[in-house]
Amino acid sequence: MIRVVIVDDHRIIRDGVRASLEASPLFAVVGEAAAGDEALKVALETGPDVLIVDVAMPGLNGIEFARRWTDGGQPGRILMLSMHTGRDHVVEAFRAGAAGYLLKTASPERIREAVSAVAGGGSFISPEVSGVMIDEVLGSSGAAGPLLSPREREVLQYIANGQNAKEIAAELGISDKTVHAFRIQVMRKLKLNSVAELTKYAIRHGLTTLG
C-alpha cells in the first residue's frame, strides 16, 4: 500500500485527490495539510511514500517545501500538483527536487498512475506539459531563468504577498536592512525595477496565490 500526504490550501482539491486515491485499495491517505509549514509537521509524523504538493500556497509554497524536504534527506518523494503548464513552473519544480508534475485537471486514473510511478522510484509529468521538459533538455526553449537562493525566494514571496520590510524581517528573523539588501539582490538578478514587477514575476512563477 502506498502511503500519501496531500498538501493543498483548497479543501475541494484535497477531497478530490483523496477520493481518487481511496477508490483503489493500493493507496492510503495518511495525512493532509493546507500549507507548507503545516505539511512539514504532518509529513514527519506520518512518514508518507509520496507527498502530493500544490505549487502555489500561502506561507511556505510548494517549490520551497520541496526544496526543504529534499535537502533534508527525507525519504518521501514529491509529486507537484499545479494548474500551471508554463515552462518556468515545471522546471523550478524539478530543480527543487520533485519527482513528478501533475495537473489539477488530471483524471482519477491519471492521479493514481502518477502516484504509483513516483512511489516506485520513477518520475511522472502530465502529458500536457511533457513537451516543456523535452524543450529544456534539448535547449530549444532557451536558457533557464536566474536561480534565486532559497532566502531570496522567501523574501520575494513575502513582498508579493504585500508585506513590508519590517513584517518580512519579523517573519524571517533578520533585520529590515537585510530585507532591503535581499530585495535589491532579487531585483538585480531578475532585472526588474519595481515591487509591482516583482509581484508579477512571483505570480507567474507560482510563488504567491495572488492573481
Image: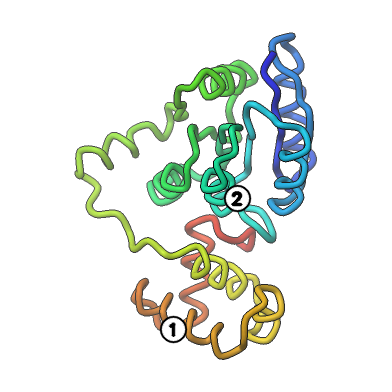
Q: Nearer the viewer, residue 119 or 159?
A: 119
Query: Residue, x 60% and y 23% (percent of image)?
Result: 111
The residue labelled by disc 2 is 65
Crowd band around label 2 with a 10 angstrom C-alpha radius: few (<14), some (14–19), many (20+): many
Please state the horizontal and vertical placement of residue 30, each as a whole percent of the image: 78, 28
Quadrant of the drawing holding the C terminus: bottom right
The part of the image, by quadrant, that contains residue 210 is bottom right
In the displayed structure image, the side of residue 84 where residue 209 appears, left or right? right
179 in relation to 29, above or below: below
The residue labelled by disc 1 is 184
Please state the horizontal and vertical placement of residue 120, each as a whole percent of the image: 52, 18
Label 1 vs label 2: CA separation? 24 Å
127 in relation to 150, above or below: above
Q: Earlier in the sequence, mark 1 or mark 2?
A: 2
Query: Residue, x 64% and y 58% (percent of image)?
Result: 209
The part of the image, by quadrant, that contains residue 147 is bottom left
Quadrant of the drawing holding the N terminus: top right
